[in-house]
Image (spheres, grey):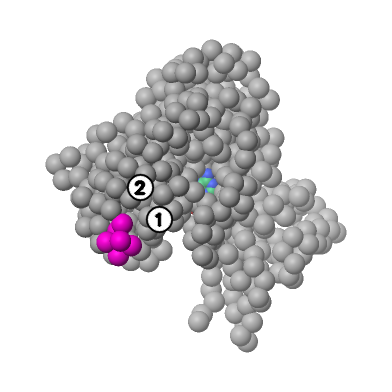
Amino acid sequence: MMNPTLETCVTNCPPASVPDYLPADALRALQLRRLQAVVTRAWSQVLPFRARMDECGLTPEGIRSLEDIAKLPFTQKSDLRDNYPFGLFASPMKEIVRLHASSGTTGKPIVVAYTKQDIDVWTSVLGRALAGCGLHRGDIIQVAYGYGLFTGGLGAHYGAEGLGATVVPASGGHADRQIMLMKDFGVTAMCCTPTYFLHLIDVAAEMGVDMKELPIRAGVFGAEPWTDAMRAHIEKMSGIEAFDIYGLSEIIGPGVGCECRRHQGLHIFEDHFYPEVVDPETGATLPEGELGELVLTTLSKQAMPMIRYRTHDITRLLPGRCACGRTLRRIDRIGRRSDDMLIIRGVNVFPSQVETALLTVDGALPHFQIILTRSQGLDQMEVQVEVTPNMFNDKIGALQELHGKLQHALDRVLGIRVKVTLVEAHTIERSEGKAKRVIDRRTA
Ligand code: DLL
């Protein structure tokens, strides 16, 4: 649903004033200049990068066209870990104004750094992302991504402020207080993870607050995979327009790409981040339209340039131009990572498939958890799924029927038999940030 005031504002913005609308030739020329500069910077300032270039027999002068990017070595998350904490910095500490860190599943976090200029770039791309969602000066934007070492909170905060909007820096947690702020301050947009917003919808209902009656009209959700089925559910329950925003700490944080109001993929802010899609196995560059692993190069980052960073996020570059008029290329929504695949009795299963299957069935809530166990050498997968509160009060037959429907939906989508357990609403632990979808209790 298009809000007329928003649409007017979006179309009234002079397109040429933002790089989103640069003619493709000018954009490519800018990208090449920036690529050459960033490679030179990394080569002269970052020893491990220079060593990699030497191994490939490459110098920065070898980069003469954008296609030459494929000659450059990849950077992996392990490079950040191996050079913990500051080994990949290309600026002296006195130039670095901010550090963020992202917790890994094991050991030390990875550390990322920003100069003042990097923060300005981040603010500008996030501002462009929010503008693409139809937000502007006069909007009141509540940021419920965590503030702290995680990039979500401060990233969205600076972007919203840069846009000239009013920011409510709520950070994560205290769902009842979030609802109170939304209501009392007349919040018009929310930035948080999609699963946290789902939780807020529930809490609002418990507090007797109808989200559809509140001024909120947009949600800018990311930091974890979520499906179109989840979007439809959120929009139906809250009356807002839900946008997908993507990013990762290593590249800058949120704001690498974002949907516009057409919702036809996420525009990558290509003047700062160069996207490629590669075959996850061979690393070969894939043509537009083909599904593979997203590889990103920062074109303007000073403190910590990332050259051909393997994101492990699976997507494709969408062909053609978006009807919104932006010349920035788009990626498909990220449904999965190359490393979140579960192999259950030889069959590949992704948590996003479970989400899609569950949301096809009325009475199931999009709160679920996958529990993996191993019994007599055989992997077992259980999907615990919350059901609407009235279900447990209903006759037993209704629960059995729902169970049967869910079992059928999951069997069909996953192609393997999994155990379905219906649990009461609010049983599965809520997260203030990224949801934990999989609990792996398998022992080696
Ligand atoms: O999650 C940055 C962020 C904050 C993005 C707020 C959007 C909103 P990291 O903690 O480093 O950074 O995690 C990055 O999260 O490689 C993806 O696997 C996943 N991810 C982020 N956004 C999306 C999205 C932040 N929109 C990792 N859809 C990435 C799917 C996403 N996955």
Q: Magenta stretch: residue 56 in it?
A: yes
> Residue 73 at x, y = what percent?
37, 58
Write down the quadrant of residue 439 in the picture: bottom right
The residue beneath circle 2 is 63
Question: Is 421 placed above or below 264 here?
Answer: below
Residue 248 sits inside the magenta stretch: no
Q: Residue at x 29, y 41 (%)?
A: 37
Residue 209: where, in percent of width, then height? 60, 30
Identify the residue shown where x is 46% and y is 52%: 295
Distance from disc 2 to disc 1, alpha carbons, whole Å, reads 8 Å
* 2 and 1 marks in contact (CB < 8 Å): yes
How many labels sit on residues?
2
Name the disc covering residue 71, or none. 1
Pinpoint residue 108: horizontal percent, then vertical percent: 31, 62
Comparing 65 with 255, the one in front is 65
**Along the viewing direction, whichever of 209 and 334 lies nearer the viewer:** 334
Q: Give the extent of the magenta segment.
A: 52-58
Q: Residue at x 63, y 55 (%)?
A: 352
Tag on residue 10? none
Q: Is residue 9 visible?
A: yes
The N terminus sits in image quarter: top right
Circle 2: element type:
loop
First of labels 2, 1 by sequence position:
2
Res 142 seen here: no
Badge 1: residue crowd in 10 Å (few <14, some 14–19, many ≥20) = few
Q: Residue at x 33, y 62 (%)?
A: 56
Q: Which sits in the foreground, 164 or 399?
A: 164
Q: Residues within 10 Å of mark 2 (few under 14, many from 20)?
A: some
Kindly identify the amino acid type of the residue bearing the numbered disc 2.
Ile
Q: The residue tagged with tag 1: helix, strand or loop?
A: helix
Vertical side of 218 occupied by 340: above or below: below
Amino acid, disc 1: Lys
